[in-house]
Image: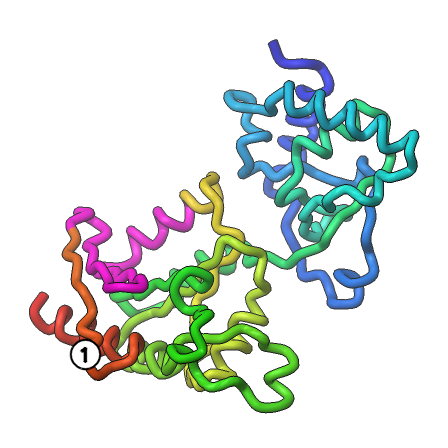
Amino acid sequence: MMPDDYRKIVDEMNATLGLAKPIHALLAERMLVKKARVDKLHPNPDDEFSDPAIGPNFEIVSAYSEDYRRRVQLETLWETEPLMVEKLNIGGYRILNGHHRWYAAMRANVSELPIKILNTVPVEKILSRLETSENERAAAFDLDEVLLCTDAALSDKALSFPNSIKYKELLRRNAGLLITELQSMGFDVWIYTGNFTPESHIRGLLKAHRAKGAKNVGVINFIRHNKRNKRIVSAISNKYKLLVHGDNEGFTVTDPKTKEFESYSLDLSGKDWSSAMISGIRNAIQTA
């Protein structure tokens, strides 16, 4: 049976469906605002927590509530991990990560919680990019697992000042050229990450590494297995006739409609990863 306090959460969330939308939080707000009242935090309708068929794990909620009560007495509440949130047009913030802690705080009569404000790419913006694109091909790369590189021998040279101050990450050698070449071949390029890396930072990083069409790259951050991403995956499947997904050792070419795919390994003999990816994709689509 659904507890009354959880039912109230669901009812209040449903009352604002279609009205509450994420908006961009300025840098000053993201840096200075470190806490929020619990009643100014709102659940994410795309999270499993908000689905009455799944809902919260009450054992986890009870454990957090007990911990919060103890921390209030010890005055160590602000040492806890902040909730990840995004700013809403209706006021307050939507929870991205931390629903159980928020619910536990309500049950423990905690009035404020530490937060970290982030900017995610709204679903509507992603869907709009898909609708306005005239391309029938797309290529997708995982920023964290594929494009970023920890081996200096395989990466682009370190950026010069002032880019070196803002962009500490190392990208694979010629990753910018890869993106530029794919776009010239009629591909929409999508970069995704499971982290909260801002869209502007990803575009700036790509531009700094000579991706001429960085402003036209589609960015999806905060990748999670939820309804938000199911909408995106469905829209991509309906949009493109051919989808390339690159990884560290090769790539797959998929027909999103039929789900049929072909896997290819990269020929790295005498080539860097990006150049091998360009050659491999070009050859694959010519024979497709």
Helix, strand or loop at label 1? It is loop
Whether 121 is drawn above or below 227: the answer is below
* Residue shown at the point (29%, 75%) measured from the top left: 273
Locate the N terminus by quadrant. Answer: top right
Q: Is residue 225 magenta?
A: no
- For this rendering, which residue is in front, 133 or 41? 41
Position in image of residue 158 (x %, y %): 52, 85
Position in image of residue 142 (x %, y %): 40, 61
Residue marked by disc 1: 269
Give the farthest residue toward the left.
Answer: 287
Name the amino acid type tagged 1. Answer: Ser
Position in image of residue 25 (x %, y %): 71, 61
Whether 27 is drawn above or below 179: the answer is above
Q: Where does the magenta region start and end?
A: 231-260
* Residue shown at the point (58%, 30%) measured from the top left: 49
Instruction: Please tell me how crowded label 1 is: few (under 14), some (14-19), or many (20+) other residues with Cα within 10 Å.
Output: few
